[in-house]
Image (cartoon, coloured by chain):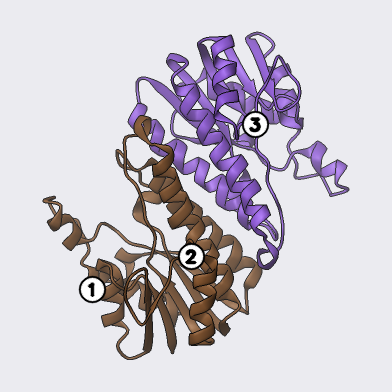
Chain colours: A brown, B purple
Amino acid sequence: MKILLVGASGMVGSAIAKELHDHQVITANFKSGDYTLDIENKASIEAVFEQVGNVDAVISTAGLIAFAPVNELSEQDYNTTVGNKLMGNIALFHVAAKHINKGGSFTFTSGFLAQNPAPGSAAVSMVNAALDSFAKAAAQELEGTLRVNTVSPRFVKETMELMGMDSSTGVTAADTAKAFRYAIESSETGQAIDALDHI
Amino acid sequence: MKILLVGASGMVGSAIAKELHDHQVITANFKSGDYTLDIENKASIEAVFEQVGNVDAVISTAGLIAFAPVNELSEQDYNTTVGNKLMGNIALFHVAAKHINKGGSFTFTSGFLAQNPAPGSAAVSMVNAALDSFAKAAAQELEGTLRVNTVSPRFVKETMELMGMDSSTGVTAADTAKAFRYAIESSETGQAIDALDHI
């Protein structure tokens, strides 16, 4: 499969690129990769597809998010989380949908926090739940044409270690990447795919 | 209880005002009510609370939404649905949280479409799910200080009739309003309260 991976430079994104070595993976990041792309800039998304042409799958792990206690969430925190992770990925989806071959797939990245909030996660939980619900709705309308899912990672073990947290409940980036393989190779659509189910 | 009801002029909002006749209900709408208020304009929200003072509960049924086939959703549709219903209500929440007496409550209105999409509902489902998840996260952090819930209405019978739909599965506005009474009078927090459970 010819796959456009948006956000391939992060912890999970780079693991996905490795996991999908048996496919043709084209990477597009904010500042690196085969192409550069800003999900907040529709023209930059369109420019990448003009060069890459049609693909069989698009995976996005891109998206900036802000954590803060709910009473301290600022307009800037919302602008980041809603403007970038939510609306940036929705913009990517709409452009990508015109360039994914019939029967192909679009995979968003949401997260366990969507339905399992933690202190400081209100904006992030909100946006992850929004992506899960959008994928479910879009998948229902596009059935037979385009599969649409989210992968919902658990806490990534390497990230927890970097943050000095107990990482015993974490899932490695390499294991998390397996859920993205499932998203592109299975026939699932409209699902929030729990990374824990595909280790 | 002293309750600020934002969006009291709509089908559900006006039913809530009637249902809560045994409380002191102050109404604030975009163009009518005891006060006028635009949830997209933070200064107008603050101005209302400056005049009303502290309250025991805030209920919002306000929020503009746009339905369209997923492939036809426009930037304007997202600006409306995300800018008004989602971020307008989040802005209302943040101002209101400073003016609700300890032990009081804030109640958003989401909807059945959050987890049960219908054709054309992608943006609406996304935003309703976002509000459910925000309430769950905020409630967890604010436990003991402020209760935060959504009421998730089913299709409103009167609205279905106005649209010429079969209304047999609908819930009347008067019955839907009972879930809002439950939201303000119960000890629930962090819940998406299904209107069907409170008829």
Tell me what residue is drawn at x 43 percent, y 66 percent. A38
Q: Let me know if residue A189 appears in the view.
A: no
Q: In the picture, residue A140 is in which quadrant?
A: bottom right
Same chain for marks 1 and 2? yes
Q: Position of residue A176 (x, y in %)?
A: 28, 69
Residue occupied by mark 3: B61
Q: Chain of mark 2?
A: A
Quarter of image, res A110: bottom left
Q: How far apart are labels 3 and 2 at the CA level? A: 29 Å
Query: Closest to the observer: A98 or B174?
Result: A98
Tell us which disc is closer to us: 1 or 2: 1
- Badge 3 crowding class, 10 Å Cα cut-off, few under 14, some 14 to 19, many 20 or more, is many
Q: CA distance from mark 1 to mark 2?
A: 21 Å
- Left or right: residue A63 versus residue A96 is left
Residue A195 pos. (x, y %): 32, 65
Q: Nearer the viewer, residue B52 or B127?
A: B52
Disc 3 is placed on an element classified as loop
Judging by the rendered image, the residue that carries numbered circle 1 is A174
Q: Chain of mark 1?
A: A
> From the viewer's perspective, is A37 left or right of A196?
right
